[in-house]
Amino acid sequence: MDPAVQKLLRQFLNLTGFLVVFALVLLFYILYFTQPADWLKSWWAEQRRAEAAETLATAPTEAPEVVAYWSAPSIESETDEALKEQLRYGKELVAYTARYFGPNGSVDANRTNGLNCQNCHLEAGTKVFGNNYSRVAATYPKVRARSGQLEDVYKRVNDCFERSLNGTALDPASKEMQAMVAYIQYVGKDVPKGEKPAGSGFKDLAFLNRPIDPVHGKVVYEEKCVTCHQADGQGLKDDFGNYTYPPLWGPLSYNDGAGLYRMSNFAKYVKWNMPLGASHDDPQLTDEEAWDVAAWVNTQPRPKKNLAGDWPDISKKPFDHPFGPYADGFTEEQHKFGPFGPIKAKLESMANGQP
Ligand code: HEC
Ligand code: HEC
């Protein structure tokens, strides 16, 4: 190329280079130090919107799960005064059972062990996933595999009197039983027959794929439970002899026929409700902590019940029923400590008619 043309070209490139840099600096200056014009702002916003719309359209819809949990009707809005009185008494008995039936109970002393129904059926049986009474009115009477019988609500309440409260059954016709059952039924009165509303019973908890471990459970107990339930597991009483913090084992606790004596019930209760203040949307224990503390507490001494009449059909025994004989071929040890997954799978295949 002619050297003169080359020189001209170089000068031209230098000039354009300079102009480009100058223009960029100017643009930056305008954007940064002055208010950009409205048309620029709205153009930019439009670009962002279009981009966002595109990501939304292509992203899999992962809307957060919105569940309408059951909540209890208020007994105070009841207009029938006689009924309201009865419901109030029933609620009082559920909340402070021991004042009426415990060791110094005013209605019938020493019928029960000092626990209140509410210790396990939290907030008088109205807490979401706090073992509430929401499904009782809609699902009883029903045949229960534990007794092999058709059970009505009176029988079910007496089950808790005899097991969870380690006491004796109450006369179904008594004023107190009538009031408790009226209250429990009232709580679930708006639930359609046969249905279990969202938030009833206990929230599920995944199995561990190892046996649950009482040694680790003791460590969990000492870290997270001992301040209230005490080192000896015997809880703490107030000046009137009522438990502020109920006992978890020993002579005043639930017996070995109670629902909480099953590891899965205990682990779920604790995972979604303990330490006090925890809830299904604010749990405070890991799954391992919940299972292992169940193993620790449920291997401590507690009252025994004669369970000879339970589970007349042994093939219906749940995966974590800790007393043999069993139809599924697994040991008593594995039914107590797991791993539970294989037992549950076997029971399901047996229920479907497979060997
Ligand atoms: C130590 C804990 C504990 C105490 C105290 C207790 N219960 Fe229970 N109760 C349970 C557990 C756990 C279950 C669920 C058992 C299961 O699913 O196997 C249950 C189940 C029930 C049910 C059936 C609920 C359903 O949805 O099927 C009723 C009704 C009931 N209890 C009433 C009472 C009453 C009334 C009292 C007091 C007199 C009481 N319970 C005291 C632990 C307790
Ligand atoms: C801040 C005090 C506190 C702590 C900590 C606490 N609890 Fe509780 N716990 C309570 C109270 C109070 C109740 C009775 C609830 C009610 O009546 O409303 C209760 C009830 C229970 C019950 C059912 C009633 C019974 O006596 O069987 C169990 C089981 C239980 N707690 C286990 C645990 C475990 C396991 C831990 C540790 C992971 C724990 N709690 C930590 C205060 C506490």
Image (cartoon, helix red, strand yellow):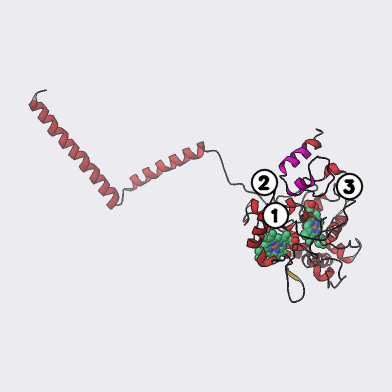
List the single residue furthest toward the left: 4
In this view, the mark in front (2 or 1): 1
Q: CA distance from mark 2 to mark 3?
A: 30 Å
- Which mark is on residue 214? 1
Q: Is mark 2 within 8 Å of ligand 2?
A: no
- Give the residues in magenta: 320-348
Quadrant of the rendered image containing residue 239: bottom right
The answer to which of marks 2 and 1 sits earlier in the sequence is: 2
Percent coordinates x, y for residue 151 in the rendering? 87, 51
- Quarter-of-image position of residue 301: bottom right
Q: Amino acid at mark 2?
A: Leu
Name the quadrant of the C terminus. top right
Q: Identify residue type, mark 1.
A: Pro
Which residue is drawn at the image coordinates 71% and 42% (left, top)?
341
Residue 77 at x, y = what percent?
A: 75, 64
Is residue 186 at all visible to an observer of this figure? no
Residue 351 falls within the magenta-colored stretch: no
Quick one: label 2, few (<14), some, or many (20+) residues within 10 Å? some
The residue under label 3 is: 148
Q: Quadrant of ligand 2?
A: bottom right
Q: Which mark is residue 208?
A: 2
* Disc 3 residue crowd, few under 14, some 14–19, many 20+, Cα 10 Å: some
Sequence-earlier tag: 2 or 3? 3
Q: Secondary structure at mark 1?
A: helix
Task: Give the SS element for disc 3.
Answer: loop
Respond yes or no on whether mark 1 lies under 8 Å from ligand 2.
no
